[in-house]
Image: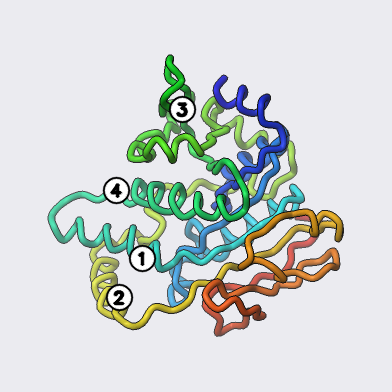
Amino acid sequence: MYLYSLMLAEKKTRVVVGMSGGVDSSATAALLLEQGFEVVGITLKLWPQDCVSRAEDKCCGPQAVMDARAVCHKLDVPYYLIDEAEEFQTKVIRYFADEYSAGRTPNPCVMCNQNLKFGRLISRADQLGAQYVATGHFARLEKSADGARTLLKRGCDSRKDQSYFLFSLRQHQLARALFPLGDKTKSDTRQVARHCNLKTADKPESMEICFVPDNDYGKFLQQAKSRATATSRPRTSRRAWKSVSCRTTTTESSFSRPNWWRNTTGRSRMCTGACLDITTGSSFIPSASAKGWAFPHPSRST
């Protein structure tokens, strides 16, 4: 009822959806569109360029980004790919390695949710004029009896409940969050995606830690230690990669973006693939050597 009352009161409110390339985030975007929100899809690119092969089949790896972009194209909503590899390395991977080194069991998903999905993503939402950030977590939100606090509750599907991974979110983060799948089961979620003809409807689930290939923790920790030494070099600029679903010139012009996203597309109906360096403000066309990935525009059949 909490989410439903928000939707009734705030039709056409802009919401950023964290797109992981899986069925849950895809269904989240579809449900919010159906319920009257203005949806913007964002995927956080969490892998440095030299780790692309390792990330291939992982959350937010190249295939996941392709799937997320195809879903946004199918739903006809704007889609952004934003490089947060440096933040991920610092806030999640380094934390993961440090905790193991100290003899403690880390929970990297909690740190990722706290610092990236409801940290950096909220910052991006602010820059886009979006009031909420939504994800595909199976969790629910309710207002306290006095209306002063936002309460985090378990998802209705006890087998898929993910509220534990969100326990560290603060009140200001919970107040900006939406979890449309909280009252649904996994089968409900897949049915939503099938109804919208989304390519992720039957995509297998990813259950392991996204950044440990082959679950070889020992090897990964050794590599993380080596990379930590290499990160002492000067900081490089981060780039925001943006592509927009087919839209008319009028719609393009009316969509408000922060200055560092301006001039990233032409006025035609097809995406140009141009990107903008956040630090320098200069536009560029990605290449094989660029810090990030370039993807072909998906066909209308996706």
Residue 131 visible in image: yes
Q: Identity of the amino acid at label 3?
A: Gly
Query: How far is disc 3 from disc 1 in space, using C-alphas?
Result: 30 Å
Identity, as a three-letter code, of the amino acid under mark 1: Gln
Q: Is residue 237 left or right of residue 253?
A: left
Q: Is residue 202 visible?
A: no
Position of the C terminus, as image quadrant, is bottom right
Q: Nearer the viewer, residue 136 or 252?
A: 252
Point out the residue furthest to the top here: 145
Q: Which mark is residue 153?
A: none
Task: Please tell me which of labels 2 and 1 falls first in the chain.
Answer: 1
Q: Residues within 10 Å of mark 1 (few under 14, many from 20)?
A: some
Residue drawn at x 44%, y 77% as measured from the top left: 50
Type of residue at label 2?
A: Arg
Going from N to C along the chain, the mark reached first, 4 or 2, is 4
Q: Earlier in the sequence, mark 1 or mark 4?
A: 1
Q: CA distance from mark 1 to mark 4?
A: 15 Å
Q: Which residue is mark 3?
A: 155
- Helix, strand or loop under label 3: loop
Q: Which residue is identified by label 1? A: 89
Vertical position of residue 250 compared to residue 159: above or below: below
Residue at the left extreme of this rendering: 103
Secondary structure found at label 4: loop
The residue at the point 46 percent across, 55 percent down is 120
| Residue 194 picture location, percent across and down | 70, 39
**Badge 4: how crowded within 10 Å, few (<14), some, or many (20+)?**
some
Residue at label 4? 107
Residue at mark 4 to residue at mark 3: CA–CA distance:
20 Å
